[in-house]
Amino acid sequence: MPAAKTSRTRGPGQKAGLSRESVLDHALTLVDRVGLAALTMRGLGAELGVEAMTVYHYVPTKDALLDGILERAFTLATPDIDTTRPWQESLHDYAHGLYQGLLRHPGVLPLASSRPAATPDMLDRAEDYLRLLVDAGFALGRALHMVNALTVFVIGHATAAAAVRTAAQGASQEPEADAGSTAWVAGLDADRYPLLVEAARTGQGTDDDERFAFAVDSLITGFADRGPA
Amino acid sequence: MPAAKTSRTRGPGQKAGLSRESVLDHALTLVDRVGLAALTMRGLGAELGVEAMTVYHYVPTKDALLDGILERAFTLATPDIDTTRPWQESLHDYAHGLYQGLLRHPGVLPLASSRPAATPDMLDRAEDYLRLLVDAGFALGRALHMVNALTVFVIGHATAAAAVRTAAQGASQEPEADAGSTAWVAGLDADRYPLLVEAARTGQGTDDDERFAFAVDSLITGFADRGPA
DNA sequence: ACTATGCTTCTTACGTCGTAAGAATGTCAA
DNA sequence: TTGACATTCTTACGACGTAAGAAGCATAGT
């Protein structure tokens, strides 16, 4: 076999065929594999078959790299929704589509807490839904409130879900760790937290996706209750 | 004047009067002042008038320190609400109280994205509200969904609000930066984002607290629409 | 009073991180 | 051929988290 990309070093001048996009994509998959805390410039360089400093030709700083992979994750997650249907259904599909999309790269979600999620794709979607809602009779300010509330909730819920998932993957002392994100609750003091423990033991309200669906439906119902102007 | 605490060093053995709590509190105020990224063990030591390694006698690792200050922030933020009133009002007050409380320490909110917010105080509150809702006739699973949705939304919204606030503090190129977190939207391409730009220019739906209040009311209305079982 | 024990603090040092500076190698236009 | 430019590598610096253990102080047991 010819020299594999993993083994041979390369002198200066020999191109490695990189681009900003390939750098961001490799960084994204690296984060998915090793976690955000273990993403280092040297490690990313190794992933790309290149020295650490080479990465700086495509990204000015590590913070810019993090901005880039978050934006990329959002772009990949932004759903394409049919906005010709009733606004309730469109918002519902938007919320669920974005949620599922975000969970495809759970490792980068913590970045969303300290950076704005205003990528071009997200702005495009926001504009689309504003149009839909305004046409449905909502005041512009009201429509913005609705889109904002839904987006914030989706990101917040996805981030929380991702956190417990990666945490469960980290500390698995007992093999009984099933899909349950709330398994630890069952071990609490049943005298102090009777209802919490009962819910955890009987499995009531513990399913993450069910929780999400309930909240989205409640939000949309609440929107409709105020009605188009 | 006698030797001030800022100037003189201290030999081994001389106590500095520290405790886990004082360490966490100083760390919290330090984060509020310089930001989360600038929190270092050496810096925290200096804040306490002590060498960096001394901190490790009260906290096993920096990660545990971060756990501690997040828990402390949540404890300080958890509101004490009268649960003898209609469940809608109690939930409303809970959401607003927690929101305002969290914004008192905006710098630590990004930590909430990667760590569980299940402090004892938060669990106490959750248990209280579960009781309230179950007594009001909701099924236990449903009640858990409601408390969870509200909490996730409050944390998510507070985190987003804190992010834009600290971001606005960082890059103020133009002096026109008022309280507006969404000022940058007005500078977007008005042809591509007509509604977004119009909303930003006319100030419709741009107030952060108003947005929050609207979303909370919508959520609670949606809860009520499904009604107590 | 003396000494052993344990708590608190300090000193030193190691490995890793982000990244500044600039040399080396390749490509391509004049 | 000769530069100018783009891409990569090498080396190095300062800051970080923290491991290891020495140094000073208090207190209990003899």
Image (spheres, coloured by chain):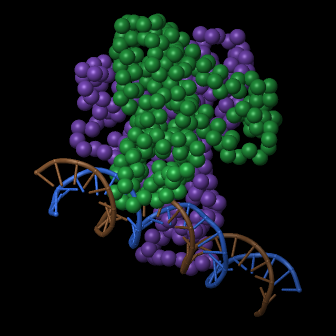
Chain colours: A green, B purple, C brown, D blue
Q: Position of residue B151 (x, y in %)?
A: 58, 30
**Residue closer to the observer: A3 or B27:** A3
- The quarter in which the N terminus of chain B is drawn is bottom left
Q: Quadrant of residue B168?
A: top left
Confirm whether residue B30 shows in the render: no
**Residue closer to the observer: A104 or B139:** A104
Number of marks in the rendered image: 0
**Residue found at x 52% / y 27%:** A101
Q: Position of residue A205 (x, y in %)?
A: 70, 23
Q: Is residue A163 left or right of residue B217?
A: right
Q: Quadrant of residue B57?
A: bottom right
Q: Position of residue B218 (x, y in %)?
A: 51, 17
- The quarter in which the C terminus of chain B is drawn is top right
Q: Is residue B106 left or right of residue B224?
A: left
**Residue found at x 45% / y 12%:** A82
Confirm whether residue A93 shows in the render: yes
**Residue closer to the observer: A32 or A5:** A5
**Residue found at x 30% / y 18%:** B195
Q: Is residue A190 left or right of residue A51?
A: right
Q: Position of residue A146 (x, y in %)?
A: 44, 18
